[in-house]
């Protein structure tokens, strides 16, 4: 596979951009080789600057649920751009998207648009602290909520349950305001509430975890989480930046019928343009400036092009059978991948749900962060490159989700499985 132009661009990029990329995971540091630079994309396919074509399972980390360059989205953005790119003033599209989100997700009675998932989660936590008058938040090891200081936290050593920074620059004093629990382990949450319950403003969780690879929630775990937060007067924040409009036309919360107090969204609701949103109970959201005292602002929040792309995306999905069709492709692909891995004598786990899946290179069921940590990431790095050379673009990290879009078809699954078969021959036994 010729990647000479990508390699030249990557070398040049590193002169001007830290690590040569504008988001760390794109640098391919967790897998072999350099990143390929994309020239254009159509449907479920990416084409890099050297002309290599790939079946895309990253889908821009989730937003491109319709596939790349969907005509409805392209046309909506084109039309919006002809009317101006940003006004710094309210426009009708913001009201339309806000209404669309509130109608699709009943727990969201009001919503504020921002420009990224990070802004959404950062703002939701500030709001929760203001509404409850409390300081502490609880997050879960392996869940990612963007790069705001309060989330770049890992469990402290030993029995210490207060967090410690995972990044330089995060003040220790702030890190201590974040408590860390274990996903799918309600006893780890109960322990924190027994010790700190009256001071916990909120629990923030990915109701279906996507940032340690796909880890499905134990339904009872989420129900218990709702109960314990209500018991202690803490807020429950569902971070649905990935799962929002991914698992159904609404939130994953619609499927499991659990009503959080606040929800954060991003990715799909912007159709590939920069977007985020946080919303929830009216009595809480009314506290957000200018209706309330909790300050939050953004030059490009509610940008008309992002609103247009998001609305066009949701309009294609609404009242369609696209979710069923993507799930069928996912089920077909996951089953055929299982057969290929078994034929090669590999021990692996595949978690899949709706239009998401992750292949984990480990021997045990993956239902916790501890299980995820047993994965053979070195092998994943070799496997990823062997797939890339065969025209299949998996996420450049074991701890990310593969996405299927409306543009993926059964024939793409067959091509993918054939590429996996050849890639496993190349990378050999683990
Ligand atoms: P952004 O700030 O990247 O728009 O969203 C942050 C965020 C918040 N919550 C969840 C559940 C998320 O998954 C994310 C961002 N997702 C990662 C990939 N898993 C974005 C990819 C990247 O960091 O480049």
Image (tube, rainbow, N blue to C red):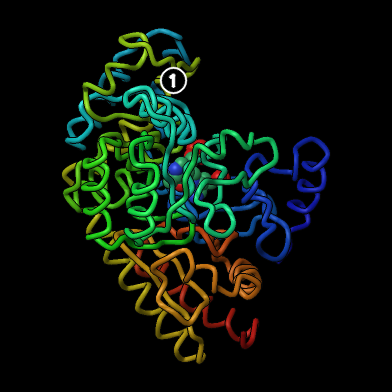
Q: Residue at x 31, y 60 (%)?
A: 217
Is 299 in front, or is 182? 182
Query: Residue placed at 30% from the left, 36% from the top?
Result: 234
Up/down of 79 relative to 138, above or below: above
Residue 108 picture quarter: top left
> Is residue 261 in view?
yes
Check disc 1 and report the residue beneath it.
Answer: 301
Q: Quadrant of residue 429?
A: bottom right
Q: Please provide percent x and percent y for residue 420.
A: 52, 77
- Which quadrant is home to the C terminus? bottom right
Q: Residue 324 in the image: x percent, y percent?
A: 22, 59
> What residue appears at the point 39 percent right and 42 percent down from the top-left corner?
196
Q: Is residue 85 visible?
A: no
Furthest residue in direction front, as rendered: 195
Q: Residue at x 27, y 58 (%)?
A: 221
Residue 240 is situated, as x and y percent measured from the top left of the image, at 35, 43
Quarter holding the N terminus? bottom right
Q: Is residue 64 above or below residue 74?
A: below
Q: Relative to residue 240, is residue 33 depicted above or below?
A: below
Residue 194 falls left or right of residue 426: left
- Label tally: 1
Residue 364 rendering spot, x and y as whole percentages: 44, 79
């Amino acid at each position: 596979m010729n990647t000479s132009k990508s390699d030249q661009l990557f070398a040049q990029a590193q002169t001007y951009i830290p690590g040569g990329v504008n988001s760390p995971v794109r640098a391919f540091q967790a897998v072999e080789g350099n990143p390929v630079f994309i020239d254009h994309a159509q449907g479920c396919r990416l084409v890099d600057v050297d002309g290599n074509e790939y079946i895309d399972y990253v889908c821009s980390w989730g937003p491109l649920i319709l596939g790349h360059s969907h005509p409805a989205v392209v046309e909506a953005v084109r039309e919006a751009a002809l009317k101006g790119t940003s006004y710094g003033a309210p426009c009708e599209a913001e009201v339309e998207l806000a209404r669309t989100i509130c109608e699709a997700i009943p727990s969201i009675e009001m919503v504020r648009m921002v420009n990224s998932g990070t802004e959404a989660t950062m703002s939701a936590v500030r709001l929760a602290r203001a509404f409850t008058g409390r300081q502490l938040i609880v997050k879960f090891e392996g869940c990612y909520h963007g790069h705001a200081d309060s989330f770049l936290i890992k469990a402290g050593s030993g029995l210490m349950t207060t967090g410690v920074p995972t990044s330089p620059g995060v003040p220790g004093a702030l890190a201590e305001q974040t408590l860390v629990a274990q996903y799918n382990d309600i006893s780890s949450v109960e322990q924190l509430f027994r010790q700190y319950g009256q001071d916990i403003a909120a629990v923030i969780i990915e109701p279906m975890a996507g940032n340690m690879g796909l880890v499905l929630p134990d339904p009872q775990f989420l129900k218990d989480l709702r109960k314990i937060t209500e018991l202690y007067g803490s807020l429950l924040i569902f971070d649905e930046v990935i799962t929002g409009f991914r698992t159904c036309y609404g939130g994953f919360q619609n499927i499991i019928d659990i009503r959080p107090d606040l929800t954060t969204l991003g990715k799909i609701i912007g159709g590939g343009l920069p977007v985020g949103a946080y919303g929830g109970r009216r009595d809480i959201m009314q506290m957000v400036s200018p209706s309330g005292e909790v300050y939050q602002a953004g030059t490009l929040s509610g940008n008309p092009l992002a609103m247009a792309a998001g609305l066009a995306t949701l309009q294609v999905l609404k009242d369609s059978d696209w979710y069923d069709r993507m799930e069928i492709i996912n089920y077909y692909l996951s089953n055929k991948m299982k057969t290929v891995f078994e034929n090669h004598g590999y021990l692996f786990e595949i978690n899949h749900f709706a239009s998401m899946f992750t292949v984990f290179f480990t021997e045990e069921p993956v239902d916790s962060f501890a299980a995820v940590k047993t994965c053979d990431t070195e092998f994943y790095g070799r496997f990823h490159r062997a797939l890339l050379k065969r025209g299949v673009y998996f996420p450049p990290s074991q701890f990310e989700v593969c996405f299927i879009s409306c543009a993926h078809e059964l024939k793409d699954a067959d091509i993918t499985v054939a590429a996996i078969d050849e890639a496993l021959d190349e990378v050999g036994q683990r």
